[in-house]
Image (cartoon, rainbow, N blue to C red):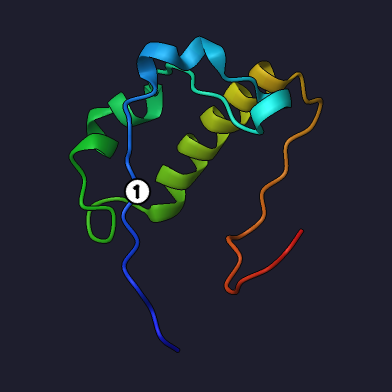
Amino acid sequence: MLLSLTRFPSTDARPIQDQFSLDREGFTLVKHASVAAADPRIRTANVTHEMDRNEVNDAYHHEVGEFLRGLTGARKRTWAPPAGFVHLD
């Protein structure tokens, strides 16, 4: 497989974040201060040694799930593992 480098410009979209719509663009930019990430046990831990990875995931996934439910109006949240291969949905 031959790969090539492609350059493209990137721009800080935060100044125009109000112009994006989840319904129109398929994404949106929102500001969110994570309570889980601010937890000093999580923020400073070496998760592989000092904390149970499940403890971190549970706190973070719950917070993100509730945040997304509020943002999208979803009634239910589900998690799926990342795809391990290229796919078309």
Q: Is residue 22 left or right of residue 16?
A: right
Residue at horizontal 18 percent and vertical 39 percent from the top:
44
Q: Name the residue under label 1.
A: 8
Q: In which quarter of the image is the C terminus?
A: bottom right
The answer to whether residue 6 is above or below residue 40 is below
Residue displayed at 76% across by 18% down: 73
| Viewport quadrant of the N terminus | bottom left
Which residue is at 73% across, 64% downward? 88
> In front: 58, or 23?
23
Q: What element carries label 1?
A: loop
* For residue 71, above or below residue 81: above
The image shows residue 49 at horizontal and vertical percentages of 23, 60
Residue furthest to the right in view is 75
- Give x and y (percent) for residue 30: 48, 18
Q: Where is residue 41 in the image (x, y as percent from the top left)?
A: 25, 35
Kind of residue at disc 1:
Phe
Dot 1 crowding, Cα within 10 Å, few <14, some 14–19, many 20+? few
Residue 66 is situated, as x and y percent measured from the top left of the image, at 62, 24
Does residue 47 appear left or right of residue 53 in this picture? left
Q: Which residue is drawn at 34% across and 48% down?
A: 8
The residue closer to the viewer here, 24 or 5, is 5
Q: Residue furthest bottom?
A: 1
